[in-house]
Image: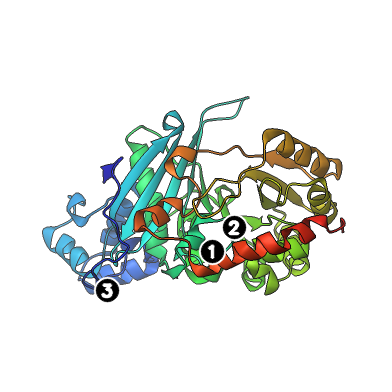
Amino acid sequence: MRDGRLLPSLAAPSTPPLDERPGIAGIAPAELAAWAGAQGERPYRARQIADFVWGRLAAGAAEMHTLPARLRAALERDFRVDTLADTSVRTADAGLTEKALHRLADGRLVESVLMRYPPRGGRRERATVCISSQAGCAVGCPFCATGELGFGRDLDVAEIVDQVRFWARRLATEGRRISNVVFMGMGEPLLNADAVIAAADALDDPARFGLGARHLAISTSGVIPGIERLTAMRPAWTLAISLHAARPDLRDILVPLNRRYPLDGVVAAATRYGDVTGRRVSYEYVLIDGINDTAADAGAVGDLLRGRLAHVNLIPMNPVAHTEWRPSGAARVDAFAREVRAAGVPVTVRRNRGDEIGAACGQLAAEQAGLAAPGAVRRRRDRMEREGAAALAARRP
């Protein structure tokens, strides 16, 4: 790890040798036990390995010093103990926010963020980690820096989980632990549902990371089949919907997936999830000055969510390089929150963290790759300029 120093630009990387070994953090306990048995080992060896992976957060087989040398060699032969090939960290907010840029074995870049919250108002100290589920993103929201990267590929289970293990290892040196994990980094989690669900299971499982279901949140911009799949599972994870506009014409522009999965269907599916699980659904709303922060927009949010098991998180937009859009001012944010609360919908205002280190999702990876905004992002922005006035003038639903 190289704190404070960025990785060399990977805009045109040479292709690394393909490493087909699976990440050990993505191996289910039964599979690990079967593997150990195939090496002629007794069952307790699998438990020892699991303790090194999950309890001691080992980054390599060499750290598993109580295992026989032959077993360590077999582990190195068959698995990657850590799938993050290299990591650089930037720090902001007097150490309260840290952002990691991880390079994977194939040269892809992904990001994760640690946000520390000191004790306040009777609440204990917290450490929340935001992780990525894809390298890049196919959804292409025009205010999101990940859109500059386009879609690279899905991450596998270990690549997702190893982001959490990275921060857990870092916090352990301070005698601290992760309190919450949110799947809100790069990518659309429910377009990589198999790996995301398996990763959440591993983080939830008391026999593995043991975070606990109520400390996990999975975000989606509105992939209805994925929401329905979670509903059928009945987990206690928090479902977060990336809302950003409550008027369909405006959401078509800000969240292009709205054309495939329209807002009414997304909210209906999310409401079923809340009803079945008893978990309040979180609606994330990035506020962009003059774009989606009017009184009409706030009224539309209130009308959409009134009477539902829902909570709204208002987030002033992180400025990103490819757009001139800027975050809503404090007065506009407060007025928006008051309007939504007046409809009986609980609201939290989340203040920006880490602006000086590129805290916007995908911003550091896009910057490091040296990429200009792709044509798709530019066209969406141009369309926003042409159609924005009409969308903003639309009457409240």
Q: Residue furthest top?
A: 121
- Specify whether 247 is left or right of 116: right
Question: In front here: 338 or 194?
Answer: 338
Please tell me whether mark 2 sits on a helix, a strand or a loop: strand
Decide: few, some or many residues near mark 2? Use Cα within 10 Å; few <14, some 14-19, many ≥20. many
Kind of residue at disc 1: Pro
Q: Residue at x 27, y 73 (%)?
A: 20
Q: Quadrant of residue 80?
A: bottom left
Q: Is 50 situated above or below 359? A: below
Say if 282 sits above or below 77 in the image: above
Question: What colour scheme does the image use?
Answer: rainbow
Residue 189: image tag: 1
Is residue 269 among the parts visible in the rendering?
yes
Q: Looking at the image, is 318 positioned above or below residue 255?
A: above
The amino acid pointed to by label 2 is Ser
Q: Which residue is mark 2?
A: 219
Left or right of residue 265, residue 209 in this image: left
Mark 1 vs mark 2, CA separation in Å: 7 Å
Q: Is residue 57 visible?
A: no
Percent across and percent down for residue 266 are 72, 66
| Corner quadrant of residue 70 | bottom left
Residue 104 place in picture, x, y as percent: 32, 61
Q: Determine whether, in the image, residue 111 is placed left or right of residue 64.
A: right
Q: Earlier in the sequence, mark 1 or mark 2?
A: 1
Checking the image for residue 352, the label placed there is none
Mark 3 lies on residue: 20
Task: Please give the name of the residue rendered at 73% of the width and 70% of the height, measured from the top-left corner.
Answer: 262
Q: Earlier in the sequence, mark 2 or mark 3?
A: 3
